[in-house]
């Protein structure tokens, strides 16, 4: 789903998200039990399951399989472009980055380096080859790509406390 979801958060939704962010594989039964124990929310596991399904379908959260970081090399790529080619060539470059099997996270940002991607590679050689092919395909557009190896990934999850603002 593209765009911002139109979702009215209630306390139960936020508590569900907090628990799932800590333990994404919780069953609906265990989640209903936790809601009762930790938040004094009495709800059936069927209702919990339905709430999770509806939030997922509406795009409130996305499911992703995050492979243990020890199996991959992570890199931060920052893309800078030659403005004289941007109007004609930006879409193909954007789609190639977005659709690459190596792209874990991709965003637009302000500043000189306006596109950023966190990418995963099985080796530094594979990373180098991807960058080489990207320059071959989009060399006119690309003014520069900064890439940084991300060593020792120390945190790779959403903290439940971050979700508190959703009730405001």
Image (cartoon, rainbow, N blue to C red):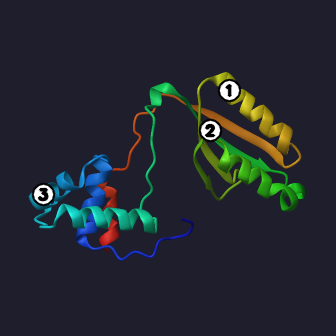
In the image, residue 9 lies at what x, y percent? 32, 73
Tags 3 and 1 in contact by the CB under 8 Å rule? no
Q: SS at mark 2?
A: loop
The residue tagged 2 is: 102
Tags 1 and 2 in contact by the CB under 8 Å rule? yes
Along the horizontal axis of the image, is 83 left or right of 29?
right
Answer whether residue 164 is visible to the viewer in this image: no
- Estimate the spatial distance between the alpha carbons at disc 3 and disc 1, rounded to whole Å: 46 Å
Answer whether residue 134 is visible to the viewer in this image: yes
Sequence-wise, which precedes: disc 3 or disc 1? 3
In the image, residue 99 lies at what x, y percent? 66, 48
* Vertical position of residue 68 compared to residue 168: above or below: above
Sequence-wise, which precedes: disc 1 or disc 2? 2
* Vertical position of residue 82 compared to residue 150: above or below: below
- Estimate the spatial distance between the alpha carbons at disc 1 and disc 2, rounded to whole Å: 10 Å
Along the horizontal axis of the image, is 3 left or right of 38?
right
Report the quarter where the C terminus lies. bottom left
Q: Which mark is residue 38?
A: 3
Along the horizontal axis of the image, is 33 left or right of 120?
left
The residue tagged 1 is: 126
Report the quarter where the N terminus lies. bottom right
């Amino acid at each position: 789903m593209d765009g911002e979801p139109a979702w009215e958060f209630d306390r139960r939704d936020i508590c569900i998200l907090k628990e799932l962010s800590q333990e994404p594989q919780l069953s609906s039964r265990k989640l209903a039990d936790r809601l009762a124990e930790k938040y004094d929310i009495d709800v059936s596991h069927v209702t919990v399951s339905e709430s999770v399904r509806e939030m997922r379908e509406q795009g409130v959260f996305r499911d992703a399989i995050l492979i243990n970081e020890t199996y991959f090399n992570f890199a931060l790529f920052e893309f800078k472009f030659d403005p004289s080619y941007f109007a004609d060539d930006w879409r193909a470059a954007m789609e190639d980055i977005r659709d690459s099997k190596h792209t874990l996270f991709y965003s637009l940002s302000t500043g000189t380096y306006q596109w950023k991607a966190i990418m995963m590679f099985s080796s530094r050689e594979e990373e180098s080859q991807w960058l080489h092919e990207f320059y071959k395909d989009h060399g006119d557009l690309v003014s520069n790509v900064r890439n940084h190896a991300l060593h020792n990934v120390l945190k790779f999850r959403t903290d439940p406390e971050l979700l508190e603002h959703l009730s405001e």
